[in-house]
Image (cartoon, rainbow, N blue to C red):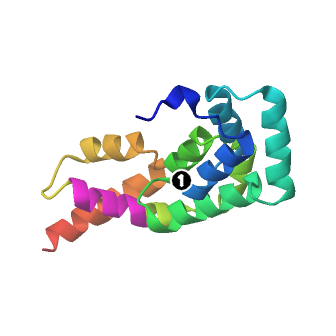
Amino acid sequence: MNNRKNVPKISAKAKAVEMLARSDQSVRRLKEKLTRKDYDQGEIQETIQWLQDKHYVDDEAGCQRRFAYLYESSSYSVKQICAKLMQKGYDSELVRSCVPEDIYDRELEKAGRVLQRKYKTSVEFPKMMQYLYSKGFNYEAARDAIEQYLSDMDNE
């Protein structure tokens, strides 16, 4: 019979490394998780410093990697990507610094993909516009994607 109360608590360093083995974590997110696990604030600070010294955690590099991955491989709008990264604990300024200057072509392509998955038949323009806007696509890209989608449907 294994009694969990008698098992010693692992160190904050070991717990943080365990968390990082599963996925990138922001410094803020690591601190929150370690705090919820009832680690002492001094031990948490020491752990974060140790992780940064060892280059196991780097908010700038982690944010850039996650942004690039989501930007290339997902159909999320840039606005959704930014919101997700901020939820993961990355600073809003850092997240915004990852956004390329011109995102129109990418937003147009992704909005078109979202429309193709969501709407198999013709739907009213305002309904599609509202849907894309609720997903964070900017007005111009959403409008142009809908026009292109409707045009493609007419040509079928």
**Nearest to the observer: residue 3 or residue 52:** 3
154 relative to 11 in the view: left or right: left
Picture residue at 54% right of the left edge, 65% below the top:
69
- Res. 99 image quadrant: bottom right
The reply to whether the magenta stretch includes residue 117 is: yes
Residue 50 position within the rendered picture, expressed as x and y whole percent measured from the top left = 84, 50
Q: Quadrant of the C terminus?
A: bottom left
| Image quadrant occupied by the N terminus | top left
Taking the spot 34% from the left edge, 62% from the top edge, the residue there is: 112
Q: Residue at x 84, y 30 (%)?
A: 42
Residue 103 belongs to magenta span: no
* Residue 136 left/right relative to 26: left
Range shown magenta: 109-118
The residue where tag 1 is placed is 78
38 shown above or below 147: above
Left or right: where 124 falls relative to 72 = left
* Most foreground residue, 40 or 58: 40
Residue 20: x %, y % from top left: 63, 53
Residue 94 seen in the figure = yes
Residue at the far front: name it: 1
Residue 86 coordinates in the image, percent (x, y)? 62, 41
Q: Is residue 104 visible?
A: no
Instruction: Look at the numbered disc 1 and give the secondary structure of its residue.
Output: helix
